[in-house]
Image (cartoon, rainbow, N blue to C red):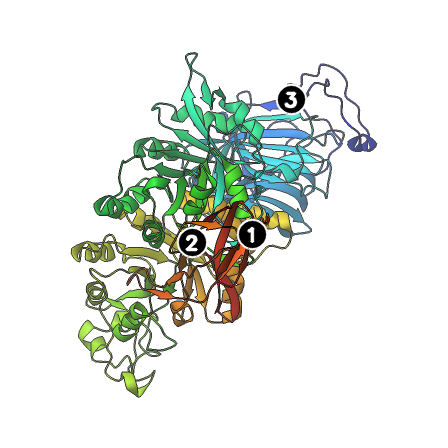
Amino acid sequence: MKSKIKAINNVAISFTLALSLFAFSSQIQADQEDVELINESFNEIANGEIPDNWILIEGNGKVQDGKLVLSSSSASRPSRIVVPIDSEYGNYTFEADMTFESSVADSRWASLMYRIQDENNYYQFAARKGASALNGLEFAKRIENRWDVFQTNSYHENFHYNKSYHLKIVVSRDRVQQFVDNELVIDSAGATEWLDGDIGFQVSGSKVLFDNVKVTTHDEELPPIEESDAFLPDEAETNMINPPTIIAGPEYSGDSSKSASSLLLVKRNQEGQLEANDQPLNEQLKRIKNKKIPVLHVEQEGLQEQIVQSLKETQTTDIHVVSSNPDIVNSIKEINPKIRSGLVYDGNSLNTNDLRNLPSEVHSSKSKLVLIPQKLLTQEIVHYLHNRMVAVWGVGADSLDSTHELIHTGVDGIVTNHPEYTVEAFSQFPENTIVQRPIVAAHRGVPSLAPENTMSSYRLAYDLEADMIETDIHRTKDGHLVTIHDSTVDRTTDGTGAVTELTLDEIQELDAGITFSKEFSGEHVPTFKEFLQEFKGKDVVLLVELKGSGLEEQVNEEIQEEGMMDKVVIQNFNLESMKKFNQIQPKLATGYLFSAAVPGSYQDKLNNAKELVDYGTISNVTLNASYGSLYSEFITYMRQRGMLSLHWTFRGEAPFADKLRAGLIGPITDYTQWLTHSPINLESPIKKVNLKVGKSRSIQAKGFLSYRTEERVNIETELYVTNNNGVVRTEGNNIEALSPGKAQVFIKHTFTMLGQEWNLVSEPIEVNVSN
């Protein structure tokens, strides 16, 4: 209700503030003081009443024992109270403590309303009881009895009953920021409809207490939305597909404009203050805010509370914390689960046993990322970790040659004190160069060639070099786990009925191959144990989708019984199931399957990407979206932040190729055979060549085709030079020495995959030419 009555309790005004609507477009002087408009703790309000001039619009609202209590029995019966604010005060900070006492469902909410025009037109900051949902927090507009939700976000926990949370809104012109316990959760430029209006409180399907209500004018302009925390840092240009992200190391002090992240070594100084790379942490965070992603490297214990406080003070919400100590990582995530984390591997070697244990250590620390010294990395190690959903940042790249070596291991990030070498190396690749082969997940085996979710289909997927074999799990009437996609046997067998209504014997009497073709007649529906046993000791990872909830404990037990803890990744469309599985078995990777619309504008795409990554981080899951939900900004956003993901389900070559070009790393497909014969990398027989002027040398590389068999074959290639300084000339596979000096020569192989051309490039060959 847009009131012209200045109903303000306990107003303290240091001078008269008079602004016309015209003044909203003028620059407000920095020396003006904020004016306190409302300060209400309800201690002087009698039970059953509300403050003077506050208006109960509908439902139940009253003061009880020093708290404003609003209660609503259902979503159709909200309760609302409006508090008049003079129209000359359109830019203000509105804050209050909020406590849920009860709620009919986690989806029900309470809100702070602002710039209220009348009963049906206003903005609000809505907070659901289940605040950790994707839409747990909202910036919304109510306009003519309909909702227009501008922005949503998730909080790092559901709101607990009888626990107080401090909500705050800062609104200035079209800009609005919303906070929970001083953590920025919504940042928008969508408040364009109204520039002034009243405030209020609303609840839907909940009983909520409000206290310590304060409204203060806010004369300082908020930063432009382009500087919000949802951003993509500039990176070095390259023709590589899905290039590693660049993280400037702590010793680098030059131009970091081509790196996406900055590694900050955090310590406490003698005065008890936090420093990062020998500068105050808050100053470092402010310096790179909205330009680079801060990666805090923490090895000193006891800094966790101070670090989280610094993030609040600087409104830093896009952040990584890494440590060699899992306890440090875990304790920081206990305080704020929205903080992304990674482990720093500090061992002197990485043998088979170390490698086998590493993924479980990463996942147990609720991380998705590991930092490993370059000297310990190989392409096979990176591939092993990728298949278990662990992203790898290699630490090194302190020369141009070592940078190329690190790039060719397939790492997801390069941590270096010499990013200039990575920038140069990035510039040396031809268009459509693949340096990181996708993680190919065979969907239900190979249903394009064999009946889905049968042993024949799984075995064929293995023979076709699938990195992962995906399957679906249901439970029979007598409690056995079987691999079948549908809830009934009707589509894939010659029988009928729900899986949950049939015993294992009844299901295994059915023919699971005849509906595909007579060739596969006699195939049965496998048990989950059969599936596990088939691939025990084989170089493949099993991607297991739980159909529904309630299967988590039994699935975990059978995985452990079969000794397959290092061979399984779990996923589900039911997020609560994945949260439960994480609690039961934190050593395995879990993924959340979902599908969502692609936002329209560039900034909306970035906001959505940030919300999803935050959501996945809070829930400790990978974001296994349908490929139709993907867009290039989302893929890049995840890559820059060390999050691998799997995406379903590719059944056409054109969209498959399109998403690979955008940087997709984990395709789930019915057509594994489309990628089977594509080479993985090129291996040069030599790294250095010495030639005399006028002489030539022919070089022929081999193609590496399989991690599993390590097969290498002769392959058609050609040579090229990037910075042609007149030292050599290349033609086909031949190098001709022209004049004294040094040159870098690369081997290139062009191949066709998914109906399009792609390139593989070798590490550079150093050519020294003398007279």
Q: Is residue 411 visible?
A: yes
Query: How busy is the neighbourhood of tag 1: few (under 14 within 10 Å), some, or many (20 plus)?
Result: many
Query: How busy is the neighbourhood of tag 3: few (under 14 within 10 Å), some, or many (20 plus)?
Result: some
> Hey, which quadrant is residue 283 in on the image?
top right
Residue depth check, mark 2 versus mark 3: number of the one nearer the observer: 2
Which one is in front, 265 or 542? 265
Residue marked by disc 1 = 738
Residue 387: x %, y % from top left: 34, 55
Quadrant showing the N terminus: top right
Residue type at mark 2: give it: Ser
| Earlier sequence position, callout 2 versus callout 3 | 3
Residue marked by disc 2 = 645
Residue marked by disc 3 = 9
- Disc 2 on helix, strand or loop? loop
- Disc 3 on helix, strand or loop? loop
Residue type at mark 1: give it: Leu
